[in-house]
Image (spheres, coloured by chain):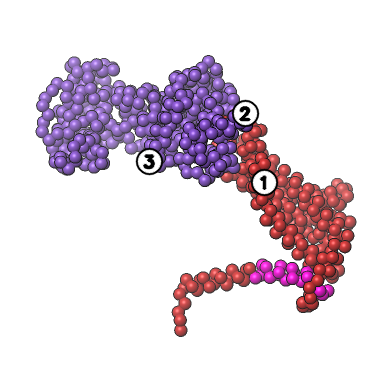
Chain colours: A red, B purple
Amino acid sequence: MKRISSTKLYQGLNLTSFSLVMVFLYIPILILVIFSFNNAKIITGWKGFTLKYYAQLWDNDNIKQAFWNTMLIAGLSTLFSTVFGILTALGLENKKFSGRRLISGLIYIPLVIPDILMGVSLALLFNFTRVNTGMFTVLIAHITFCISYTVIVINSRLEGFDYSLVEAAMDLGAKPATIFWKVKLPLMLPGIIAAALLAFTLSIDDFIITFFTSGRGFDTLPIYVEGTIRRGTITTINSLSTLMIGFTLFLVIITKRIRKILISSL
Amino acid sequence: MEEIRIERISKDFDGFVAVNDVSLTIGSGELFSFLGPSGCGKTTLLRMIAGFESPSNGRILIGNTDITDIAPYNRQVNTIFQNYSLFPHMTVFDNVAFGLRIRKTPKSEIKDRVGEMLALVKMEDQAAKYPDQLSGGMKQRIAIARALINKPKVLLLDEPLAALDLKLRQHMLIELMNIHDAVGITFIYVTHDQSEAMSISDRVAVMNYGSIVQAGPPDDIYERPNSIFSAYFIGETNLITGEVTGIEDDYLQLKCPDGAEGFFEIDSTFHFQPTVGKQLTVSLRPEKIALSRSKPRYQDDINMLRGTIEDILYLGSHTQYIVRVGALKFRVFSQHKRVYFDEKALDWEEQVWLFWHDTDTWLIDEIPDSSLGNKEQPDTGVNHFQRSAKRLTQV
């Protein structure tokens, strides 16, 4: 019998565990993608290729509405939470600001609070203040939970910031505003883009908080999907999910490009 | 072209006095260095000239303009930072053009002047690269070009060569001197490296504890140190401390704390007149002392001591000998004037004569504990001497 050297054994084990992780991560997604083209109402086996569920998706006004709602909420909450994130991170950078530790502590807390608590408390707040639930309340809720993430991402970028670059710019004749636009912002940009992307993805797939703050009549995609699956129609959901996967991949790919374009334009 | 006047400048950081009542005039076009150990206040002084720190007291003038309260971006002063601080998101060209663009210089002029500057620092072919594609020496050149393009009245250099390796450092020193000659403006150079400061500067200010200990041309500071700190910090030296017990013309008798006495021939045209009963220190540079197997012919301006070689360190260009004279240890640098192997080299435990000219016996009107004692540099020559020199032998 051949002896297997221990390094080979470890290599084998590594490869096996790596493959298993990959299988568990991507097999379900792969199945979902494949079955979105399956010509069958339920997942029982391959019944032939079809695009009819994509067509149904296109014809379904509810889905279209939910899609546009999601995009609107995601876009606006990304915009607001990123801008607030930049401002907060810059404020927290100021070492003379005495409330700095308290505020940064308060910003971290929403990260560890369960979504359901956040959803319920927001729902109670809106109920208490008699604000009608709908697009507006969902937007407020999304901005609220996204800010924590954007502040942390942008802040970590600022922590490694070489302050002597600001001094160098000042030395070369740049006034504070110019330094911000020409030196500080471009160097923060990778952090800002990462923060915006994170906020966007958090917003488009949030279910729990949206569920508690949307009320009737304002559906985002996750809310719509949940409702549809409850009623048992899974086929259009497969194709919808496939489109969303494609969209996310597209976002990841263009991020690098966006960064380059933004940096060179500043 | 105007001179820089620093008038009674102090800087206090929450009770820590970084710069203590410094007054200084730096001439137009001069290459002036601040030299001192870390924490001596040299960088703080430079940063106050640049405008990054505002002094607690005093004022700074360029020509007749008081710049003390002028913001850094309105000063006609530019800085080379220790880590270069090039903008990582800009190309070399954009880095160098930064100052001109802020002043809204026309595009065609920017192109010409950046080209000129890159030529001055020999980096014409690197304009399109980003800083992280450049070596340390190249970044240094770009930093110089980026500063000089603004035609400052003064260029401040904060330990500009600290991050470079030895060979490159020596090369860049010469480059810096050439650039200084080419642009003709005032350079203020901060360093803790005495050889850098000595080789590049017109004048050097030796600093310790926030004050200027001595300012003057490098050779003046080296040959005529006014204090133990200057003598020790610049180059190496042998220091002998004691009380004057007798003076006759140019002949000084010195008594060490433990009671032993020694005699020194001193230059009678000395900068201060020692009196009997005075405590003072003798500084003797290791390269001024000659070693000989045979007793030198007597001359009345020569000091002679007999000692034993205790240690020999061959260093290529010269050999360092540690010679024991009684309980005293002298460091002696001896150059190899002929081919080294032709000489019969001195050996360990060999008896030798040490001798030096009376003008090289330099008296310092100071005794150790009062002035030295920068805690960051515990291993000073004085301490070394005090440990070993319990007794000074008769000559």
| Front residue of this view, candidates B273 and A78 | A78
How many labels sit on residues?
3
Residue ID for mark 1: A261
Range drawn in magenta: A23-41
Q: Is residue B34 left or right of residue B318?
A: right
Calculate the distance from the C-alpha at mark 1 to the C-alpha at mark 3: 41 Å
Determine the secondary structure under disc 3.
Answer: helix
The reply to whether the magenta stretch includes residue B148 is no
**At 79% across and 63% down in the image, what residue appears?**
A240
Find residue B167 and name its label. 3
Spot occupied by residue A179 in the image (x, y as percentages of width and height): 63, 35
Determine the secondary structure under disc 2.
Answer: loop
Q: Is residue A20 left or right of residue B214?
A: right
Find residue B105 and name its label. 2
Disc 3 packing (10 Å; few <14; some 14–19; many ≥20): few
In what quadrant of the picture does the C terminus of chain B appear? top left
Disc 2 packing (10 Å; few <14; some 14–19; many ≥20): few
Label located before the other in sequence (3 or 2) = 2
Determine the secondary structure under disc 1.
Answer: helix
